[in-house]
Amino acid sequence: MSKIDRQEILDVLDGYDREDITIATLGSHSSLHMFQGAKAEGFRTAVVCEKGREVPYKRFNVADEYIMVDKFSDIVTDEVQDKLRDLNSIVFPHGSFVAYAGLDNIETIFNVPMFGNRDILRWEAERDLERKLMTESGVRIPKKITNPSKIDGTVMVKFPGARGGRGYFVANSTEEFDQKIESMLERKWIEEKDIKNAHMEEYVLGCNYCIHYFFSGLKDEVELLGIDSRYESTIDGLVRVPARDQLDIGVNASYVVTGNHPVVLRESLLPQAFDIGDKITEGAKELVPPGFNGPFCMQTLVNDDLEIVVFEMSARSDGGTNTFMNGSAYSYLYYGEPLSMGRRMALEIKKGIADNRLEEIIT
Ligand code: AMP
């Protein structure tokens, strides 16, 4: 199926009453602050909600309209798309939206205006494209190991798809790689077909910082809006047992993300953080025009040489933005008041409408 023609989206947008825009997304992931922020900026909000999952939106009172669906993936059906367009909706993408709507559908059949660059979502999902974007942008990433027989240091082994760290493991030799693959198969965390797609990279020993940026297409500038760090089971639980026991318990340590907490970087690292944001947005403009648009996140590890190494990116609002629903230390510096990523997105839409430049930030 062919990609949706940009003109079709612009035609839909053309039919919208710009005084009466709805901000809509799937009720999951990082939607709460998107709705809260949109309402704070005067927009109507619509949640596309799986039946039985409406409680948070009702209890936090962040949604004006409920589009109820049997399953999240129904967001791409003609019926739901019609309802969204009838409400003059602009969709805010996030991780669950991409996962449930599906990349192919977003590119070919989801004919509702979205904030952000829908073409860049694939560059996050496909590891080779992601590495190309980072390498060509000049961002430091972990070195890749091409074959398990070439493991000669500590490596991190990953499998395709966003799994929240599930199935990832560390190996120090080819033998250990083989043995851990067996153990992951036994736990049913991976399947036989995943083995040939195992991705191996340098294990970066350091601390985790997930840096949340916002690229304003209207200002042509990257803002650093917040930083979080991940809590991962079982690796973070291991530090709670004595070192001697870690040797036994830690053999099959895993990296399943279970939560996030807000952090700040030491101030002397901020120039590097801004440099990464600037480089990747410049690279993205070249490779996937118009480049980033709105929220994106660089997931990093900072080693003891104080080098920020990027091991993953989100090309849309990342789940860690939930750590600053009421603002972060950094968003406060820009705006002098608590500002979430969702509210920053709504502000951009509002400015786009006011300056008659909405077309530039919609795909
Ligand atoms: P991801 O699913 O890519 O977000 O990774 C899950 C977790 O695995 C991360 O939060 C890190 O703790 C860890 N991780 C990923 N890549 C590396 C790496 N190259 N070196 C060390 N740890 C890593």
Image (spheres, rainbow, N blue to C red):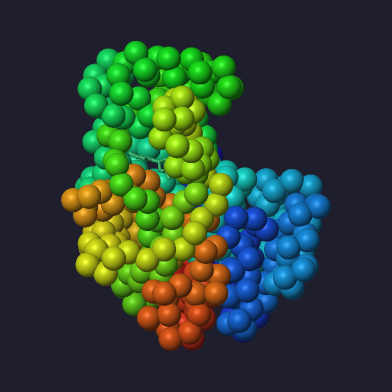
- Residue 29 left/right relative to 144: right
Q: Image point 68% across, 58% down: which residue?
A: 27
Q: Position of residue 95 (x, y in %)?
A: 54, 51
Left or right for 88, reference 202: right
51 or 13: nearer the eye?
A: 51
What residue sits 48% from the left and 38% below the top?
241
**Quarter residue 315 falls in:** bottom left
**Residue toward you, 322 or 28:** 322
- Name the outermost residue toward the right: 52
> Residue 10: percent from the left, percent from the top?
51, 66
Which of these two is toward me, 188 or 222? 188
x%, y% of residue 14?
A: 56, 73
Find residue 227 and report its image quarter: bottom left
| Position of 200 relative to 237 (above/below) | above
- Determine the residue positioned at 77% across, 68% down: 59
Q: Quadrant of ligand 1?
A: top left
Q: Position of residue 246 (x, y in %)?
A: 44, 31
Q: Left or right? Give the position of 200 relative to 193.
A: left
Q: Is residue 356 above or below residue 160?
A: below
Q: Is residue 132 visible?
A: no
